[in-house]
Image (cartoon, rainbow, N blue to C red):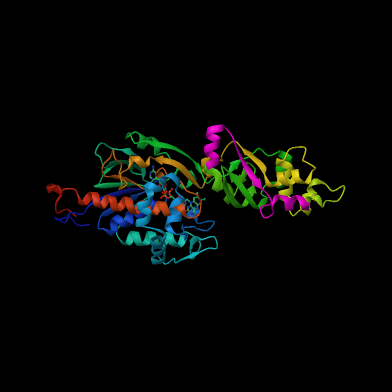
Amino acid sequence: MSTTSDRRWTATVIGGGPAGLMAAEVLAGAGCSVTVHDHMASMGRKLLLAGRGGLNITHSEPTEELLERYGPARTRLESAIRRWPAAALRAWCADLGEPTFVGSSGRVFPQSFRATPLLRAWLARLSATGVRLETRHRFVGFASAPTAVLLDTPGGRYEIETDVVVLALGGASWPRVGSDGAWVPLIREAEVRVSALRPANCGLCVAWRPDWLERHEGAPIKNVRLTLDGVDVRGDMVITRAGVEGGPIYALAAAARDTIERDGSCTITVDLSPDLAEVQLAERIARARPGDSTTTVLRRAGLAAEAASLVRELGGRQLPAAPADLALLVKRLPLVTSATMPIDRAISSAGGVGLDEVDERFMLRRKPGVFVAGEMLDWEAPTGGYLLQASFSTAVAAAEGALAWLAERPVEPDLAGET
Ligand SMILES: Cc1cc2nc3c(=O)[nH]c(=O)nc-3n(C[C@H](O)[C@H](O)[C@H](O)COP(=O)(O)OP(=O)(O)OC[C@H]3O[C@@H](n4cnc5c(N)ncnc54)[C@H](O)[C@@H]3O)c2cc1C
């Protein structure tokens, strides 16, 4: 970006995840001199982790439906996502040599399915456009000037002042890849409201009986329907040492977390036979032969061995004998949880910088010139590519907001002509 006097604006981006790197790309593309600082030994570690099981980069559903996934945060994210929607993200991937494809569920993945080729190509392109990538640089707070930050580096602590700052420090899940949430008190010191980072898209703890767990740890319970607060989800869940994991569990995790925080525990209703109506299931159960164990009865009624065993584990010591009552239990098995899995194993985190703490340009109202993007903002969404979509879109919005804010600033005469 050139001003009337050809002064080149300087930008500090902190956090080398998808949001920070995207903000850097937009700022550098407009002519700014940009440095990205990350405290890890390399950039984009969580993006690489996300790519391990297949990088679900966005979703192919219409933007209107996609926006609904952000719940109450939709109103604040909408303009950013409409400005840089899934189509823009897919075109950007293709431009980096990774065309995308739509999976059977509507989720979008890069051709290689992984994050590594995308990140490698991206970092090379950023370096080629002059973006400086500084690793092992840790943000430790703001300095006295509005756009000055303090960084701990291998060479000591430095104060860096640039024309704009973009913070993209991520949430607090999987801290070992860099997103440790240690920034929360640092931002609060600037009197910015930050709500506590809490696990999202996470497993739920269940107190299994040890002898049952011994036999079933790692077992998938396939094709279940889970219901909580009138919301139904279907898919496979997995029994783990601490409780349950899997797509449908993650989808209900936010609601379960909020219920646990309010009531101390939460009961999810599990339908182990979602393709059969209760009466049909009761009819099948009624065909049992005299002397059949309940497990055999359930197996004959169409339940997999693991599912039948789960009925015994969760259904109480005395299972009902009457076919109608047993069918009802199979269709409405109570799964009680009183805790989410810890945040350090969650896919994402809820909480962060309050959306009312930033203006429509994603600039902190209390710190002119400091912009915020990505998961460190207080929004949450289910899995399905929505996390990366909003991280990228808010980064584009924050960087464009920074450029617009710079364009309105008078050029300081003593700096004019500097490049
Ligand atoms: C196992 C797993 C699988 C996932 N799969 C998907 C998926 O398929 N699809 C999807 O949409 N999302 C997925 N996600 C979520 C997605 O990875 C995140 O939402 C996304 O990376 C957030 O981007 P971000 O740039 O805001 O933050 P991050 O990617 O967390 O980047 C923040 C960066 O800031 C750096 N940092 C933090 N604190 C400091 C500091 N004080 N100083 C300097 N640097 C700092 C960190 O090192 C990090 O590099 C997954 C997450 C996990 C854990």
Image quadrant of residue 244? top right
- Residue 379 in the image: state x and y as whole percent: 43, 45
In this orientation, which residue lies closer to the viewer: 107 or 332? 332
Image quadrant of residue 207? top right
Q: Locate the N terminus and report the quarter of the image it occupies.
A: bottom left
The reply, left or right, for residue 349 in relation to residue 336 is left
Q: Locate the C terminus and report the quarter of the image it occupies.
A: bottom left
Let me know if residue 311 appears in the view. yes
Q: Is residue 60 above or below residue 211?
A: below
Which residue occupies 70% across, 43% down?
213
Which residue occupies 38% across, 63% down?
92
The reply, left or right, for residue 411 in relation to residue 282 is left
In this orientation, which residue lies closer to the viewer: 335 or 227? 227
In this orientation, which residue lies closer to the viewer: 195 or 281? 281
Q: Is residue 298 above or below residue 101?
A: above
Q: Which region of the structure is painted magenta?
A: 255-284
Which residue occupies 35% across, 52% down?
79
Q: Is residue 278 magenta?
A: yes
Q: Is residue 412 magenta?
A: no
- Residue 48 in the image: state x and y as whole percent: 47, 55
In this orientation, which residue lies closer to the viewer: 87 or 178? 87
- Residue 415 in the image: state x and y as whole percent: 15, 49
